[in-house]
Image (cartoon, grey):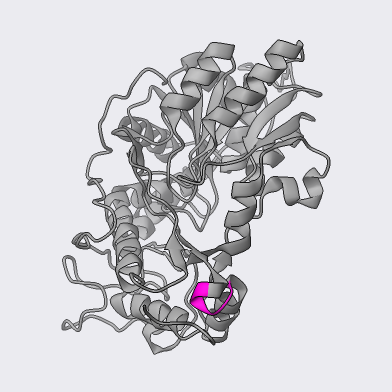
Amino acid sequence: MAGGCARVLPPGVQAWPGRGAEAAAEQALAGRVPAVVTHRAGAQRGAATSGTPVTAAAQGAFLHLSPPDVGAVERKLLLEAFDSGWVAPAGPDLTAFEDEVASLLGVRAAVALSSGTAALHLALLVLGVRAGDKVVVPSLTFAATANAVRYLDATPLFVDSLAATWTLDPEMVADELGARATSGRPLPKAVVAVDLYGQCADYDALLEVCDRYEVPLVEDAAEALGSTYRGCAAGTFGTAGVLSFNGNKIITTGGGGMLVTDDDALARRVRYLATQARDPVPHYEHQTVGYNYRLSNLLAAVGRGQLSSLADKVAARRATNTLYREAFAGVPGLEFMPVAGYGESNCWLTAVTVDPAAFGATRDDIRTHLESLRIESRPTWKPMHLQPAFRGCTMRGGEVSEDVYARGLCLPSGSGLSDNDRARVVEAVLSAPGAVRRR
């Protein structure tokens, strides 16, 4: 996976022009969940077209940060799987979902699992991480990345992020590995890089460091399906990639994840361990401890439906990011997560940082004001080295992740947002008590 990619972009996912670009045309599905109401194919979201319901959110309903966006296609495939009798654990939809994701990303193998965390856990286990080992993890991430290390009784080595991308700092990783090699201390058993809020880490630089010290790299692309790095799909870098289909992700199976890899032996081992490590004999024989980590056939059917509209979902989130950038241009004290020049983000979540002195209100002032208007927003991830669960773990750097956390806020970014929803978020941010609207 480290040596290139089979596709320059997943089929149907167009390059994101970045800030200031026109929003991409969107196509919606019928029968969405209540907060994500349907409109006709090709119609602009929120437009007053005949037969188009007005979104509940436009009438003041609660706007969620990143809700599931499901519809008629998912319902049809789910009921077909149910009626076929293939309920659980395996079945044709599970196999097809794995094959379709592998084909989309251009990898040899994919294993559908119960969560992205399960995929991280098994990836590290198969790579040989054991009790007492160290694993490099960015501090600026969701807790699942570090939790998977602790499942194996290993210890995270937290490393700071780059201010220019908010992703794992390759130079700090090189410093950590180099210091250990020079002093004779054991090298970490793996490096886990995270594609934060949809933006890929710098894999050319990270792979060079990992190859130099012969430490395997695992790509945590839980937030990045549909993103690219230098034209290659997120999830395809390092020894294994991890995807998440949690309810808030860009596509969802309600709960689920996937390990993707070009290493057939690794995929076979992960699949074996995920099915309770049951040997292929008539009786229940187990040579090792396994896990109940497989995705069900029914949820895989939902995933297939979601995957068919991935391009639309990516386009919608990028359009939201572009609209926010244009709406807040010239507003003092509001800055967006930097855009890395080497890739195209799926814009899973749009994040801003707030300078209270310039904007007139703090991050938390904005968040609580939005909450009073029934709009969900969330602080950016609290760094792992500040979490009580990881007290005492080694941290290299920390200033960048601490600053992003202190001032960062994620705004509603779901692929079902209407124009009215987006406008409501913009007005809510600008109306925060004390806010300076423009220069």
Residue 201 at x, y = what percent? 46, 37
Residue 343 at x, y = what percent? 33, 40
Q: Name the residue located 22 percent from the left edge and 45 percent from the top edge.
A: 12
Q: Name the residue located 32 percent from the left edge and 53 percent from the top edge.
A: 314
Front residue (pair 29, 207): 207
Front residue (pair 408, 122): 408
Q: How many marks?
A: 0
In this view of the protein, can residue 304 be seen by the observer? yes
Quarter occupied by residue 89:
top right
Q: Judge from the rendering whether residue 362 lies leftward or rightward of residue 225; answer left or right.
A: right
Front residue (pair 147, 86): 147
Vertical order, 93 against 107 (above or below): below
Vertical order, 343 against 439 (above or below): above
Q: Name the residue located 47 percent from the left edge and 51 percent from the top edge.
A: 197
Q: Name the residue located 79 percent from the left edge and 37 percent from the top edge.
A: 393
Quarter placement of the C terminus: bottom left
Furthest-right residue in view? 392
Q: Is residue 303 magenta?
A: no
User: What is the span of residues highlighted in magenta in the rendered image?
Assistant: 358-362
Quarter occupied by residue 372:
bottom right
Front residue (pair 289, 431): 431
Q: Is residue 361 magenta?
A: yes
Residue 11 at x, y = what percent? 23, 39
In this view of the protein, can residue 275 be seen by the observer? no
Residue 334 at x, y = what percent? 45, 68
Vertical order, 5 against 19 (above or below): above
Magenta part, dominant SS: loop
Q: Judge from the rendering whether residue 131 lies leftward or rightward of residue 415; answer left or right.
A: right
Quarter placement of the N terminus: top left
Quarter occupied by residue 344:
top left
